[in-house]
Image (tube, rainbow, N blue to C red):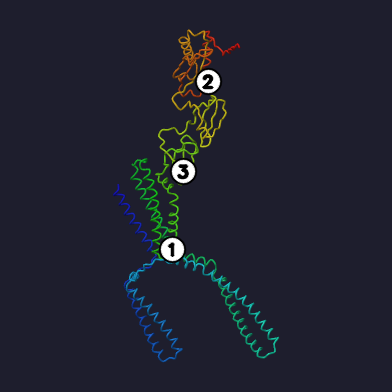
């Protein structure tokens, strides 16, 4: 079984990995052939030679130029040198192919986690900037227009102030200076008007584009489905494939372990179930991130890595607080499945340990569902063959004051009883559990006991004739009773010599099918004893009161 399972596992994992690569590479550009690579190298070399020739020409020109022209030519030479270096780097990279030359550089021993996190977040921020570029440009233009209008107001006030100063002075030098100053402020006003006009035109173009909203939406959707949407679809298909594969492996494993003892394997199976779920989640996460990486979508990969890191940090903080709950879920804690536990003063069977655990009493109608946090404070024990409740539905019980009642309904909250008059009696279940009563139905039989006394003048026959005749009369009475076959045993014995009578204990043992007639049997015994005394002429005494006078 184990070898076959291992073969299934290895084969399935290989298929999953291969399918992931196929899905990821399906939308990649075709690999550049060797011939195309050589052609690209020729093109780059030609461009390098052209740039070198241009640089030499500029160097020759700079020798015969004045200082101002030489400065401009040197700037052009620097730009050409930068372009030559760029082309040489591209040539080198094309020549060596996909070899990563970063490993040849010196290794930096300093690790800055802020820089690493910023590199991960950079693609996300850049994509967000692209998505919000138009609203941000509109906001900047609106702010520029508002500031320009404020500047216009200030410039107009300055011009008016200069004009008033010109009107109030007669000095020609002052007038000339004010005129020059007025001209500069008028130029500022003109520049302000041009700046405002340009900003308003740009804002109008952004807000009132000729492209309809439907064309904008359709273009955006088409670009999404060709790019990031296709990546998400590939990731989704890959995740579903890994999940289906893991489900298949689980069915194969469960089919191989059906012959194992459920009680013995309960804990191992629970551990295996949670380990399987964790492994499935990790494999799906790895497969999805691999698709994002292969497709080169840094935004989705960054978001997925951040989500995984957030989940890991959350679990790291939560696990210490829920260690006991984890033990309960694995069925190795203080409370375990199929064991007995007390809750709200009543015994319960733990039928399921989960996020919402289930407690059930086989005698009750209904169950109790509790969160796992409430279960962590309980302690269970093996139930064995103990009864789950002192009464069952349909049992006949005798309460205090000799009240006979039938159990009609049992729920986690209420126990309903019906007495012989048909009246329903409701008792809270925890209170009923602690009540003392006789259950006539639980065992194979029950007994009915009564006491009867005769006068002392019959003392001579009190140990022989009287018990025999009373027992015989009771047997005869039960022959005409509804439960003749339910009589197990009849006992009549002298119980005590009382103050005014000889008291007999009359005891009848009945099978449980006569439990509903408990009070009727009790009355039948008294009636039979009275009938025997009447027939035999035995006197039934009543209590005498003796008054003793003490002389002083």
Considering only vertical position in the picture, is 371 above or below 184? Answer: above
Specify the farthest residue to the right.
168
Which residue bears the numbered disc 1?
Answer: 302
Residue drawn at 58 percent across, 78 percent down: 195
Position of residue 351 measured from the top left corner of the image (x, y, whole percent): 44, 40
Mark 3 burial class by Cα count in 10 Å: few <14, some 14-19, many 20+: few
The reply to whether the C-beta atoms of the residues labelled 1 and 2 are less than 8 Å apart is no
Residue drawn at 66 percent across, 79 percent down: 157
Mark 1 vs mark 3: in front: 3
Position of residue 252 measured from the top left corner of the image (x, y, whole percent): 34, 48
Specify the farthest residue to the left.
3
Of the residues under marks 3 and 2, which one precedes in the sequence? 3
Of 171 and 6, the residue lying toward us: 171
Residue drawn at 46 percent across, 64 percent down: 225
The reply to whether the C-beta atoms of the residues labelled 1 and 3 are less than 8 Å apart is no
Of the residues under marks 1 and 2, which one precedes in the sequence? 1
Of the residues under marks 1 and 3, which one precedes in the sequence? 1
Which residue bears the numbered disc 2?
Answer: 520
Numbered tag placed on residue 377 in the rendering: 3
Mark 2 burial class by Cα count in 10 Å: few <14, some 14-19, many 20+: few
Mark 3 vs mark 2: in front: 3
The reply to whether the C-beta atoms of the residues labelled 3 and 2 are less than 8 Å apart is no
The image quadrant that residue 300 belongs to is bottom left
């Amino acid at each position: 079984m184990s070898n076959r399972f291992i073969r299934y596992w290895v084969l399935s994992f290989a298929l999953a990995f291969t399918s992931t690569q196929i899905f990821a590479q399906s939308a990649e550009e075709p690999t550049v052939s060797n011939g195309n690579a050589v052609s690209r190298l020729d093109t780059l070399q030609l461009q390098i030679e052209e740039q070198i020739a241009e640089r030499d020409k500029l160097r020759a020109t700079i020798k015969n130029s004045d200082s101002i022209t030489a400065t401009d030519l040197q700037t052009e030479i620097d730009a050409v040198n930068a372009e030559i270096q760029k082309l040489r780097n591209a040539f080198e990279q094309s020549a060596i192919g996909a070899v990563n030359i970063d490993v040849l550089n010196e290794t930096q021993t300093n690790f800055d986690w802020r820089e690493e996190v910023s590199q991960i977040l950079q693609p996300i921020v850049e994509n967000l900037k692209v998505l919000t570029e138009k609203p941000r440009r509109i906001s900047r233009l609106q702010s520029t227009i508002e500031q320009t209008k404020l500047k216009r107001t200030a410039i107009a006030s300055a011009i008016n102030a200069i004009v008033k100063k010109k009107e109030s002075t007669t000095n020609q030098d002052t007038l000339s200076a004010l005129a020059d100053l007025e001209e500069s402020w008028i130029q500022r006003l003109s520049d302000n008007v041009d700046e405002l006009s340009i900003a308003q035109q740009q804002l109008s173009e952004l807000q009132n584009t000729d492209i309809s909203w439907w064309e904008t939406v359709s273009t955006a959707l088409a670009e999404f489905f060709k790019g990031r949407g296709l990546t998400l679809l590939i990731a989704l298909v890959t995740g579903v494939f890994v999940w289906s594969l893991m489900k298949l492996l689980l069915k194969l494993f469960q089919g191989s372990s059906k012959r194992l003892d459920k009680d013995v394997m309960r804990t191992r199976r629970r551990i295996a179930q949670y380990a399987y779920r964790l492994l499935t989640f990790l494999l799906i996460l790895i497969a999805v991130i691999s698709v994002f990486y292969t497709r080169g979508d840094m935004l989705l990969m960054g978001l997925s890595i951040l989500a995984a890191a957030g989940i890991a940090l959350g679990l790291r903080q939560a696990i210490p607080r829920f260690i006991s709950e984890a033990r309960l879920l694995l069925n190795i804690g203080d409370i375990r499945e199929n064991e007995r536990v007390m809750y709200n003063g009543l015994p319960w069977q733990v039928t399921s340990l989960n996020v919402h655990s289930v407690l059930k009493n086989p005698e009750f109608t209904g169950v109790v569902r509790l969160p796992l946090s409430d279960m962590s404070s309980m302690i269970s024990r093996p139930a064995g063959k103990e009864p789950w409740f002192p009464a069952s539905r349909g049992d006949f019980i005798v309460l205090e004051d000799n009240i006979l009642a039938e159990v009609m309904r049992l729920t986690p909250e209420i126990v309903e009883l019906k007495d012989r008059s048909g009246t329903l009696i409701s008792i809270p279940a925890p209170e009923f559990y602690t009540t003392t009563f006789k259950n006539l139905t639980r065992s194979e039989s029950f007994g009915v006991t009564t006491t009867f006394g005769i006068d002392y003048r019959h003392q001579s026959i009190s140990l022989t004739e009287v018990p025999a005749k009373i027992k015989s009369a009771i047997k005869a009475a039960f022959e005409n009773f509804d439960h003749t076959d339910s009589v197990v045993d009849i006992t009549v014995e002298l119980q005590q010599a009382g103050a005014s009578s000889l008291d007999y204990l009359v005891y009848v043992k009945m099978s449980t099918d006569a439990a509903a007639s408990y009070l009727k049997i009790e009355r039948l015994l008294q009636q039979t004893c009275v009938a025997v005394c009447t027939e035999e002429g035995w006197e039934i005494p009543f209590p005498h009161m003796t008054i003793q006078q003490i002389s002083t």
